[in-house]
Image (cartoon, helix red, strand yellow):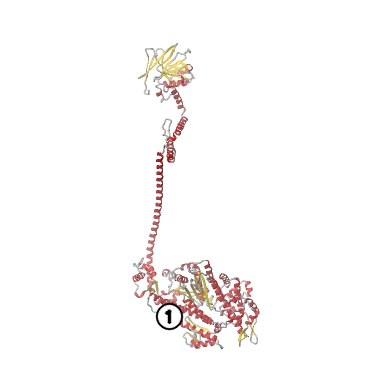
Amino acid sequence: MMESALTARDRVGVQDFVLLENHTSEVAFIENLRKRFKENLIYTYIGSVLVSVNPYKDLEIYTKQHMERYRGVNFYEVSPHIYAVADNAYRSMRTERRDQCILISGESGAGKTEASKKVLQYYAVTCPASDHVQTVKDRLLQSNPVLEAFGNAKTLRNDNSSRFGKYMDIQFDFKGAPVGGHILNYLLEKSRVVHQSNGERNFHIFYQLIEGGEDDLLRRLGLERNAQQYQYLVKGNCPKVSSINDRNDWKTVRKALSVIGFTDDEVEELLNIIASVLHLGNVQYGGEDSGSAYITTDTQIKYLARLLGVDGTVLKEALTHKKIIAKGEELMSPLNQEQAASARDALSKAIYGRTFSWLVNKINDSLAFKDESFSSKNASVIGLLDIYGFEVFQNNSFEQFCINYCNEKLQQLFIELTLKSEQEEYEAEGITWEPVQYFNNKIICDLVEEKFKGIISILDEECLRPGDASDITFLEKLENTVGGHAHFLTHKLADGKTRKVMGREEFRLIHYAGEVNYNVKGFLDKNNDLLFRNLKQVMCMSENKILNQCFDREELSDKKRPETAATQFKNSLAKLMEILMSKEPSYVRCIKPNDAKQAGRFDEVLIRHQVKYLGLMENLRVRRAGFAYRRRYETFLQRYKSLCPDTWPNWDGRQVDGVSTLVKHLGYKPEEYKLGRTKIFIRFPKTLFATEDALEVRKHSLATQLQSSWKGYSQKTKYQKMRHSAVWIQAWWRGILARRAAKRRREAADTIRRFIKGFIYRHQPRCPENEYFLDYVRYSFLMNLHRCQPKTVLDKSWPTPPPALVEASQHLRKLCMQNMVRKYCKNINPEWKHQMEQKVVASKIFKDKKDNYPQSVPKLFVNTRLNGEDINPKVLQALGNEKMKYAVPVIKYDRKGYKARNRQLLLMSDSAVIVEEGKLKQRIDYNSLKGISVSSLSDGMFVFHVASEDNKQKGDVVLQNEHVIETLTKVAICADKMDDININQGSIKFDVAQGKEGIIDFTAGSELLIVKAKNGHLSVTAPRLNSR
Ligand SMILES: Nc1ncnc2c1ncn2[C@@H]1O[C@H](COP(=O)(O)OP(=O)(O)O)[C@@H](O)[C@H]1O
Ligand SMILES: [Mg+2]
């Protein structure tokens, strides 16, 4: 909304004059303009009309960003701008499919042309485009510099004044892309070609060519780089202007020409024509005595002949003679100097004027949309009217008359359309209102254009009438015909005071925009716009292709008089009005702030004048007469609904009821507003301002509320999002877990099933049904084995192998045992090994043969049972160095009475020695030890059988001790008699010496008893041991 954009700067004054409190005051109006102008706010609205004040300096408000800001935005939402008008027209065209036009008016130098360029640029930048459209856009934009070069000039009012009127249609396709264009041009000020007032210039193109044209080009054209050399360029006495850079502009124009599609040849021909006009200007005449004129500058004729492509002599004749037809005969009548000069100027004007029209046609060709599938009926059009503004000079001529007449027509259109539309709106909305009085300038338009009675009719009449009509007779005729008109005055008709400021050759029109005196001099000629027939003929023969198109041979045979300039202009204006009426208009009213073309200067008098004649106050009055402010219900409610609890935050009922509730709550008085069909109308700006202020206050609290709820909302959404994500992830993860579990269960079931099947088929040969089971059994057997191998050789446990592994199991068991044994053997210590060896020997001898053997197994064999101190030193001495391997106490039974005697048995390296105290009682060489006998019982008796041939021997020896197994094992090892130990059942026989025999009888009894029996035998009762 407009109001929302009221930033501090924009609050300078009001953005819309409709909101001015004191709307009838011109002072207030101008003060508002001034305040805004000082802040470089050059745009202000009156309703939908844009008022623009020329800043005369570049403002940073035409950037691409600015264009974007206005694109598609409601008219009132942003500060006033030409782009808002352009965009609004564009959108109306798009949405309502109604052709639009933008009418730009204002006096010369007020900024019309600039405004129209801004509009064009806006469309070129913001409208959608395709490749083809891009060329159209470029051409549309580039048509401007070309037309300005040929049709604009420096005047006293404006350094770049448009000297022709321009109406341009921009065609858009259904997508809203510009696809073509068409230009209508109005009345070029041709007189400028041959004459300029002091301080003014000819058309830009002449200076551009001379300043910017390449040396080569100028040589070809026969031109010098010096404007002072050319009669047509020196009249105004100002060939150079500081604000104009002709050389740069030349480059721009050259580029633009090629963008538009001019070939190099066409450019060359065009420049030939421009150069030829300059040469024509320099054609000089001399006078003969007869008064006939002759040409004194032959070089010019040479150049002209070449540049125009005509015969030099024919041209020369045509420039000095006039063809007349008298009594059916053609005659060449010589011209005097003055006539010849004006014929020459007429030719220059004709050439330039027609070339300009040709140029416009050429541009139109290049802008025309050429797609055949696209009929212009489907195109929507935006028209842009940039026509010369109302202008008043010291001396005003036919051109000013036409220009100001044109502005009268536009003003009339403006009045009609704005009033009409305002009125229509009230009608449509069903609002009653009183019509406003305004100045209707139809009366002035009629004065100028009315048939038979209007000034143009009178002028034409004078031009056509036979006899010597002149500008003065025209003036008289005016006085006679329209002398009584309220808006017409002449010197003769004026009162004394006015006479002082009027020449005798002038007539005054009281225009809507002010009073202008027109000098009638030249009116007839300019209206006739005559070119002598012979000059026309010459031009028709031109070899220059452009001129060839400009001067049509048919024209020569056409006997009908062409329409006069004024009538042509009148008719083309009528056509223009028709075009504009058929479209929906938007208005841009341009104001120039001072006459000095200076930035920052606000000339109040000048501006008041423009405000007045542009009818801005009336415009405002009309707009305000009814209601200052209007909005559609939706828009109004949307903006202000926060001010009433019933409508906030939403109104559910009809919009109109919502608005009604809202304004009642706001305390609007019944006379302050009216409710139409779709809009609310508010009469006074202060009502709206109060509402707007209330909104401003409300906004702050709303902002806080909004902020907090927004924060809450955004946090909540954030949380929701996170929660949702978490739930999502959870669900996925659970899914994955469940799927995994299911898979495991399935596999487990499969396994069990296979297992059971395998179990059932386990005794069958390997087959698919049981292979798994069998493999598993094998596997588990091996694994079990791996885990519970026997740890020691004594551990005989071994898992039961499955049938398939019985053999393998045996191998393994063996291997395992071997391994353990090997390990055991490797780790056994020498002492233990020794012990072991002895035990092995004992086992070989006694195992399963002697009863007390088992008791001996767990008892370790000791190295010796007698230490050094237990043996008598004498014995030790007697034994000398001999190594004693084992010593043990024994009991010896003598052979006669079997008396028991304590002795010691010592085992030496090669003999066993029996010792009694300090005496070596008996030494038995191992060699002579024939054998050793023991009983199979548990007694400790043993007998050494000694060889009897040895004299020294005293027969076999009967001994006994408690360590019989150990002692005998030692003896067997020392004497190497393992195989010579006899184990006897019942009794042992032994030699008692000299051939006598002794017998020992063994019996088992409860305890050990050794006695001499009655039969002389030694009787041994051996205790029975538990193990047996
Ligand atoms: N919006 C604007 N911003 C800056 N300068 C401008 C603007 N409008 C006009 N002018 C200046 O004023 C001069 C005259 O403007 P122009 O549009 O040619 O006037 P008009 O066509 O109404 O006679 C321009 O050459 C330019 O220097
Ligand atoms: Mg202009």
- 139 shown above or below 751: below
Q: Quadrant of residue 270?
A: bottom right
Q: Position of residue 688 (x, y in %)?
A: 38, 72
Q: Secondary structure at mark 1?
A: loop
User: Is 831 situated left or right of 200 in this image?
Assistant: left
Q: Position of residue 1019 (x, y in %)?
A: 38, 15
Q: Position of residue 98 (x, y in %)?
A: 46, 72
Residue 764 in view (yes/no) = yes
Q: Quadrant of the C terminus?
A: top left
* Neighbourhood count class around disc 1 (C-alpha, 10 Å): few under 14, some 14–19, many 20 upward: some
Residue carrying label 1? 438
User: Is 526 situated left or right of 49 in this image?
Assistant: right
Between 154 and 1002, which is closer to the camera in this rendering? 1002
Q: Quadrant of residue 659?
A: bottom left
User: Is 966 situated left or right of 456 in this image?
Assistant: left
Between 649 and 127, which is closer to the camera in this rendering? 127
Between 1000 and 859, which is closer to the camera in this rendering? 1000
Q: Position of residue 194 (x, y in %)?
A: 58, 80
Residue 874 in view (yes/no) = no
Q: Quadrant of residue 536?
A: bottom right
Q: Quadrant of the N terminus?
A: bottom left
The amino acid type found where label 1 is placed reads Tyr
